[in-house]
Amino acid sequence: MPILQTDTISPTFTGSKKSLLFPLILVTSLFFLWGLAYGLLDVLNKHFQEALEITKQRSTLLQAAYFGAYFLMALPAGHLIRRWGYKNGIITGLVLYALGAFLFFPSASMESFPLFLFSLLVLASGLTFLETAANPYITVLGDQKTSAFRLNLSQSFNGVGSFIGPIIGAQFFFSNASDSSNLDAVQYVYLAIGMIVLIIAGLFSVTTLPEIRDRAIKAEVPVKPLFSYAHFKWAVVAQFFCVAAQVGGAALFINYCTETGSGMTNEQASYLLSAGLLLFTIGRFTGTALMKVIAPNKLLAIYALVNVTLSCVVAFVPGDVGVYSLVAIFFFNSVMFPTIFALGVNDLGPHTKTASSFIIMAIVGGAIVPYVMGSFQSTALAFTVLIFCYIMIAAFAIKGHEVKKAR
């Protein structure tokens, strides 16, 4: 793999920018793949509550397994990517993703919730490799000033995958919800996904990807340890609450709609979830465009404060108004994850890959907070948790993102 030399803040490439186009498109496809996995996850919650006869709180263990894998695997993934390079790290992630998807077949055959949790753990371990590799890869390939723009653009395709996931779930998982044998649909959906992921892995194996070495990053070489950078530590905290809010809101979305939304069915709520994720996708593209004229941290602050308001409505005004406020939250969630990530790794030089691992570890917020929300008797009041989450994100955007230069 050719090495990209980075002598200044903006990397200078050994090949032409045109030669990087296909590799960048291929890497961007990874954002779609993990978006699809996440989009299906939130539909599985309600589906398993009925098909496997489990409680709302127990169903959130799906999120615990899925996002817990990020916490467990982020540092090992980062270490292996530093040793093996981006390409091998990505292929490893795709193979684990496919293996986890294939494990859904025996899980459904045995109707075993613990085995489903293990399957998700394996699948999400693969996603951890993909996110740990792809997020910093996109931010470094270009001018540092536009890193948030590039990452938001690539993450837009994550939104496309997230939007398609609930549509698939509504069509296959809830089309005959009264029959518990519809777990067969889970088998075949994940079998198809596993086969597609293996094809993508094969494509990566025969494609030359530009590689970036830590030793090649010379711009703004830090003279102090990673954890002495306040903006990085703030980013870890902000990302924890960002993922916590996004996952918690989506995990209980169908429950909220069916309990408070004028007799809405599971299938109708699934399609509404897909509509929310469509808004999320639209928000990614529009947010990326807005970053041409609005500083990323300012846009993040505005969106976070809007979601503080919307979360108050969801929690305290249940019903149709609350439902549509919850849908609107998805739009303003759109730019949060990639913008926090890009601001968090800003000016870290050789620390970039290690910092990426820690920020990815913060995704564990999506494992912890949904379980806490599931413990509330009232689904509506569970959304008070989101108010605090968005306040923390706003604090990062207003002040915590600022980079203090090393002396």
Image (spheres, grey):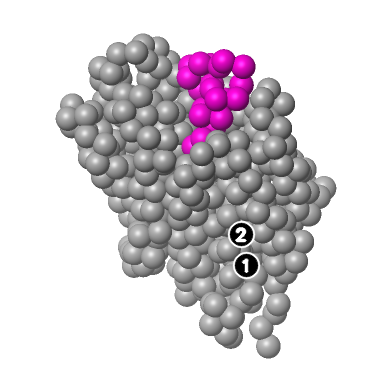
* Outermost residue toward the right in this view: 293
The residue lying toward the viewer, choosing from 86 and 297, is 297
Q: Is residue 81 visible?
A: no
Q: Is residue 359 above or below residue 288?
A: below
Identify the main secondary structure in magenta. helix
- Asked which secondary structure carries label 2, the reply is helix
From the viewer's perspective, is 152 left or right of 399?
left
The amino acid pointed to by label 1 is Trp
Q: Residues within 10 Å of mark 2 (few under 14, many from 20)?
A: many
Q: Is residue 381 magenta?
A: no
Q: Name the residue at 46% across, 33% down.
A: 42
Q: Quadrant of residue 63?
A: top left
Q: Residues within 10 Å of mark 1 (few under 14, many from 20)?
A: many
> Which region of the structure is painted magenta?
251-270
The amino acid pointed to by label 2 is Ala
Q: Name the residue at 67% across, 58% down.
A: 392
Q: Which mark is residue 234?
A: 1
Q: Quadrant of residue 279?
A: top right
Q: Name the residue at 61% across, 76% down.
A: 229
The reply to whether the C-beta atoms of the residues labelled 2 and 1 are less than 8 Å apart is: yes
- The N terminus is located in which quarter? bottom left
> Where does residue 265 sit, x and y in percent of width and height?
51, 16
The residue lying toward the viewer, choosing from 316 and 69, is 316
> Where does residue 20 sit, x and y in percent of width and height?
52, 48
Q: Is residue 268 above or below residue 223?
A: above
* Outermost residue toward the bottom in this view: 407
- Give the Cα separation between the discs numbered 2 and 1: 6 Å
Q: Which mark is residue 238?
A: 2
Q: Which mark is residue 266?
A: none
